[in-house]
Image: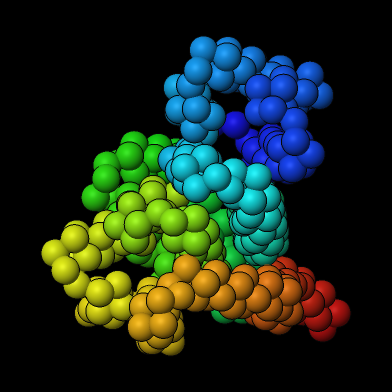
């Protein structure tokens, strides 16, 4: 699969060249010559060869061993059949850019808490495994009653001294087992459901999937592709299996004669809000379902932007309280017995 930047450059340049009246084969050749990616240049060379042999652009792309996804190829195919290839390419470039920007916002938002938690776990692990065991003999020499915080710290230190290696091996084994079992479809589905229910992060994941689904669906519908085919293609662009499963079920229900809004509003499909279901119903009644999908996609894009901007503000107080508690506990556990010991020596 070619990356987003290569897809974006291809769509923008192809739309510009076609609008200028340059034949499609010459346009592909021009983009091939300008491409900085050796793998993409090779793919464009193969597409040019197919075009010279009389294939359509969409068929030539489809032959490139999954270099282009079904959504991309369907948009090109619809443009060729309608005679609006350059408009479809321009529209496709705009949507790829929006999807890419939204994806980057989500990644940046999730990176902040993941980085903080990872650093905290690494520091905590180092203290627990390398430093705490050294305090066992030190405090054991104290001929005085130790404070509760020190006793808890000693218990933790003893555990890490004698069982720290086993704990580390257990954590590694758990990660390996989870990774192996995580390849089972049922486990993948369960994990995707769990991620959707996580505070803050779950909401970002849900909004990201809804944004991608509605934007892709809207683009396909506006290009003249049927609702059934648009649903099937859009479902395969998502990476959350809960969403994928529900959209494929909606596809089956629409094939049986149900409306999209009715299928979305069924029990057990809480990822589709009541507001979204009502907007789909309005789009169906007005005959502007594609435009309504794009409108909903823009709404979720704004929601993601608001969440990603505020995630640091929301998490910082919680993390500061946790870190502050840990520092206070360690300080109390280490300093209190030393203070008591010096006091008893002075007496």
Q: Is residue 166 visible?
A: no
- Return the x and y of residue 99 as percentages of the image width and height: 62, 56
Give the residue displayed 56% in from the left and 19% down from the top.
51
Q: In the rendered view, how is the structure colored?
A: rainbow
Left or right of 27: which side holds 226? left
Question: Vertically, is 59 above or below 227?
Answer: above
In the picture, the quarter occupied by the N terminus is: top right
State the residue lying farthest toward the left: 256
Kindly identify the residue that appears in the image at 50 percent across and 27 percent down. Answer: 56
Q: Position of residue 87 (x, y in %)?
A: 64, 51
Residue 291 percent across, percent down from the top left = 52, 72
Q: Residue lying farthest right? A: 346
Front residue of 343/190: it is 190
The residue sitting at 56% across, 75% down in the picture is 295
The quarter holding residue 91 reads: bottom right
Quarter of the figure with residue 339: bottom right
Residue 292 higher or lower than 57, as above or below: below
Residue 154 appears in which quarter of the rendering? bottom right
Position of residue 150 in the picture relative to residue 244 (left or right): right
């Amino acid at each position: 699969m070619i990356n987003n930047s290569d897809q974006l450059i291809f769509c923008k340049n192809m739309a510009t060249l076609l609008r200028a009246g340059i034949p499609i084969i010459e346009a592909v050749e021009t983009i091939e010559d300008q491409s900085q990616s050796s793998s993409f240049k090779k793919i464009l060379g193969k597409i040019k060869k197919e075009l010279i042999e009389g294939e359509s652009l969409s068929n030539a792309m489809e032959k490139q061993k999954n270099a282009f996804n079904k959504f991309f190829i369907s948009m090109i195919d619809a443009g060729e059949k309608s005679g609006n290839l350059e408009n479809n390419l321009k529209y496709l470039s705009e949507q790829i850019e929006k999807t890419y920007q939204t994806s980057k916002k989500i990644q940046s938002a999730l990176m902040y808490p993941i980085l903080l938690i990872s650093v905290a776990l690494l520091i905590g692990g180092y203290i627990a495994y390398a430093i705490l065991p050294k305090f066992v003999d030190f405090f054991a020499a104290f001929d005085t009653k130790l404070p509760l915080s020190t006793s808890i710290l000693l218990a933790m230190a003893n555990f890490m001294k004698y069982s720290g290696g086993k704990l580390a091996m257990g954590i590694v084994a758990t990660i390996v087992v989870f990774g192996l079992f995580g390849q089972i479809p049922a486990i993948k589905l369960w994990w995707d459901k769990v991620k959707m229910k996580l505070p803050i992060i779950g909401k970002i994941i849900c909004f990201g999937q809804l944004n991608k689904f509605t934007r892709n669906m809207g683009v396909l519908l506006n290009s003249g592709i049927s609702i059934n085919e648009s649903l099937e293609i859009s479902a395969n662009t998502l990476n959350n299996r809960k969403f994928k499963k529900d959209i494929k079920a909606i596809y089956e229900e629409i094939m049986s004669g149900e409306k999209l809004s009715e299928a979305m509003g069924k029990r057990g499909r809480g990822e589709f809000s009541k507001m979204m279901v009502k907007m789909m119903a309005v789009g169906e009644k007005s005959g502007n379902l594609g435009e309504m999908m794009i409108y909903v996609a823009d709404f979720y894009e704004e929601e993601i932007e608001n969440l990603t901007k505020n995630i640091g503000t929301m998490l910082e107080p919680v993390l500061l309280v946790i870190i502050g508690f840990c520092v206070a506990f360690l300080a109390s556990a280490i300093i209190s017995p030393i203070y008591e010991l010096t006091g008893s020596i002075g007496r």
